[in-house]
């Protein structure tokens, strides 16, 4: 699962939809893989308005990556190549292959196996 995907996932439990603790999900016991991909600045520029920067920072720092700036950059063109490469690496090349995502509100654990998060809840949790 790419970190870009993790930036859009929250707890599936209905009780957690209004809780700020349910997003972002905490990433624990993660095994990471880096997959080299072609840099596409136009994609990064287009996706930036949809990125929850604070959630992304929390996730990357849980994974030991401190390469992103504390403040969300105003990415309007491809002139900042260093920033584009850093974002590209974090959002698209870094993949969580194994691990868990945990809701900070209800504590539900979503396992990640072979890069795929299992976001299903049991009937009692719905």
Image (cartoon, rainbow, N blue to C red):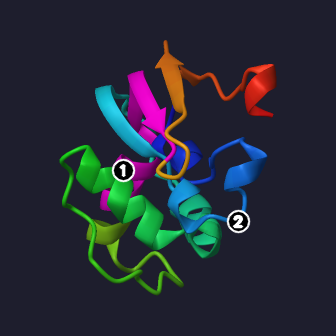
Residue at 26 percent of width and 68 percent of height? 82
- Residue hosting label 1: 90
Q: Nearer the viewer, residue 10 or 124?
A: 124
Dividing the picture into quarters, in which one does residue 87 lie? Answer: bottom left
Residue 21 location, x and y as percent?
Answer: 51, 61
Range of magenta residues = 86-103
Which label was assigned to residue 18? 2
Residue 26 location, x and y as percent?
Answer: 41, 45
Q: Within the magenta stretch, is there residue 75?
A: no
Query: Which secondary structure, mark 2?
Result: loop
Q: With 106 as the anchor, is 57 left or right in this view?
A: left
Q: How far apart are marks 2 and 1 (CA)?
A: 28 Å
Compared with 39, 76 (above or below) is below
Residue 95 location, x and y as percent?
Answer: 41, 32
Is any part of residue 23 visible from this angle? no
Query: Which secondary structure, mark 1?
Result: helix
Q: How crowded is mark 1: few (under 14 residues within 10 Å), some or many (20 or more)?
A: many
Residue at 49 percent of width and 14 percent of height? 113
Residue at 45 percent of width and 50 percent of height? 91
């Amino acid at each position: 699962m790419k970190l870009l995907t993790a930036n859009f996932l929250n707890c599936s439990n209905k009780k957690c939809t209004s809780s700020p603790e349910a997003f972002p999900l905490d990433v624990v016991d993660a095994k990471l893989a880096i997959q080299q991909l072609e840099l596409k600045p136009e994609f990064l520029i287009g996706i930036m308005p949809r990125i929850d920067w604070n959630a992304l920072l929390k996730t990357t720092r849980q994974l030991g990556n401190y390469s992103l700036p504390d403040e969300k950059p105003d990415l309007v063109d491809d002139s900042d190549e260093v920033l584009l490469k850093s974002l590209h690496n974090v959002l698209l090349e870094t993949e969580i292959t194994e691990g868990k995502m945990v809701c900070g509100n209800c504590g539900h654990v979503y396992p990640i196996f072979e890069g795929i998060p299992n976001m299903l809840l049991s009937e009692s949790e719905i």
